[in-house]
Image (cartoon, rainbow, N blue to C red):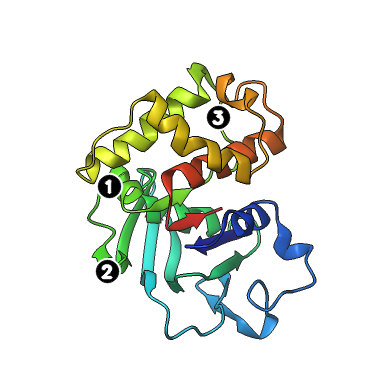
Amino acid sequence: MTSFTANCSVQSCKLANTGAFQRTKTPKHYFSVKNLVKKSNVLCYAGDDKSDKKVLLQVEGLTAVIADSDQEILKGVSLTIKAGEVHAIMGKNGSGKSTFSKCLVGHPSYKVTGGSASLKGKELLEMDPEARSHEGLFLSFQSPIEIPGVSNTDFLRASYNSKRRANGEPELDPLEFYAHLMPKLDSLNMDLSFLNRNVNEGFSGGEKKRNEILQLSILEAEVAIL
């Protein structure tokens, strides 16, 4: 299952990232069988109607193929996500959930052949992957990779300052970034020792996922694909 969260709390992201859709007692905005609609060969949770909310991600009729073989995977997927919503996309293995997510962030292994996608009203498919991230789109890894020799603190500060530069804002020095980082760390109940460890090196599966939620929080992503 792939889940999308838009301008939600860190707690909502933590629930989505741990598969809470399958374990909760079906809170109204998490899961509703009547709202499941077939899009291409996957099921999309349509979400509750929140007409007064700003549309953050709009996908219409997206089709895509594997870049190397031109094998068609996506056959017209449409999805609308508004601020504050959590959506779930479900389907069997190979149905296109990961392909859909990777197409949205600009993965080079896939080629979009039709349809459109916009993020906050801007044409998403025309942006480089870095620009999509700077605009507030975040994709988690199924298996986060280890980066030996790079501490979490350095990695997070470099990522955050890259976004600030792209937005025309001054970079934060180490002390300024530490002040920005600590409230995020506290909200996730993460130990300070995480900051000095190399990125994901020796982390358990759960620690890697918590580390990704910390990255999401630091980057202040507006649409997170988990």
Label 1, residues with CA under 10 Å away: few <14, some 14-19, many ≥20: some
**Which quadrant of the view contains residue 223?**
bottom left
> Looking at the picture, which amino acid does disc 1 mark?
Ala
Label 2, residues with CA under 10 Å away: few <14, some 14-19, many ≥20: few
Instruction: Find residue 121 and name its label.
Output: 2
Horizontal relation, residue 119 to residue 193: left or right:
left
Alpha carbon separation for disc pair 2 and 3: 32 Å
Tell me the residue at 30%/35% (across/down).
Answer: 162
Tell me the residue at 38%/31% (across/down).
Answer: 176
Instruction: Find residue 131 and name its label.
Output: 1
Horizontal relation, residue 87 to residue 69: left or right:
right
Closest to the observer: 215 or 98? 215
Would residue 143 be visible to someone looking at this image?
A: no
Residue at disc 2, secondary structure: loop
Instruction: Find residue 49 and name its label.
Output: none
The residue singled out by tag 3 in the image is 145
Mark toward the start of the polypeptide (2 vs 3): 2
Residue 63, position as x, y percentages in the image: 38, 65
Tell me the residue at 37%/53% (across/down).
Answer: 136
Residue at disc 1, secondary structure: helix
Contact flag, marks 2 and 3 (Cβ < 8 Å): no
Mark toward the start of the polypeptide (1 vs 3): 1
**Which quadrant of the view contains residue 142?**
top right
Residue 203, position as x, y percentages in the image: 67, 27
> Looking at the picture, which amino acid does disc 3 mark?
Ile
Nearest-to-viewer mark from 2 and 3: 2
Residue 126, position as x, y percentages in the image: 22, 56
> Looking at the picture, which amino acid does disc 2 mark?
Gly
